[in-house]
Image (cartoon, rainbow, N blue to C red):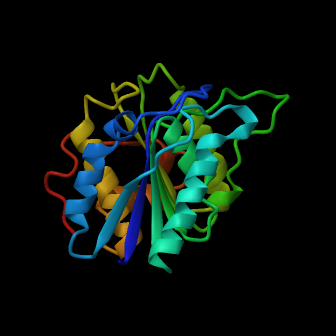
Amino acid sequence: MSGVVLLLPAGDEVSTRRPSTLWAAASVRTLGRRFERAGRAEGLATHVVHYRYRGWNGSEAHLAHDATWAAEEVVRRYGDVSVCLVGIDMGARAALRSAGHEAVNSVVALAPWLPEEDVAAPPEPVKQLVGRQVLIAHGTNDERTDPELSFRLASRAKKANREVCRFEVHSDGHGLHQHREEVHALAEDFVMGALFGRAFSRPVRDAMAAPPPLGLRMPLASGFGRSLRR
């Protein structure tokens, strides 16, 4: 085993209900299968994180704690392997928040649910992202969580860590359904590069290298992934 992807499903802002196994896997199953096919030769393992509760639940940050627990489990099972946290919606927030675990080398945050900024509350932390490769993708028409919030978080993270990039999926909503194939191809490209050292595609390299705001407002081209060259 040479690399592990932990898939963090969507969640709720507040809920102490216990999610069903089917509910947890539904939002990340397709992406997980794609990673498995792409990383089969390298021995990639993928695991869906099953949360204790469906909600983030304020300062309890249950989903982030569950993500950290899962990273510990990876170390216990597989030893010294690199981990990529891949999250969607509230799972993306958990991925970003839990990136400080020593086994984590990269994060993919798709349509991250982030709290509205409040002058009375501290901003979402970014120091845990230092030393990690980070990809954020967000639909410009997302009505569930403001894409401007992920841009601001990426801007703060980029000041301390140049290996942060963010792609904007124009005209797409929160579920990123309209351009799902391109989003999944982007995630695959990034994960295979981060975990196994494969060359990133040109758009990812350009986004990483570009100074803010260019590399944090990189448009995801229609058809991305159809003719990628490694």
Front residue of 225/208: it is: 225
* Quadrant showing the C terminus: bottom left
- The residue furthest left is 227
> In x, y percent, where is residue 228?
19, 59
Seen in the image, is 170 located left or right of residue 131?
left
> In x, y percent, where is residue 87?
46, 46
Q: Determine the residue positioned at 38% across, 33% down.
A: 23
* Quadrant showing the N terminus: bottom left
Vertical order, 24 against 140 (above or below): below
Front residue of 6/201: it is: 6
- The residue furthest top is 143
Q: Determine the residue positioned at 71% across, 48% down.
A: 125
- The residue furthest right is 120
Seen in the image, is 98 located left or right of residue 119?
left
Front residue of 49/187: it is: 49
Decide if residue 30 is in sight here.
yes
Q: Determine the residue positioned at 46% across, 50% down.
A: 49
Among the 4 quarters of the image, the one containing residue 84: bottom left
> In x, y percent, where is residue 22?
34, 36
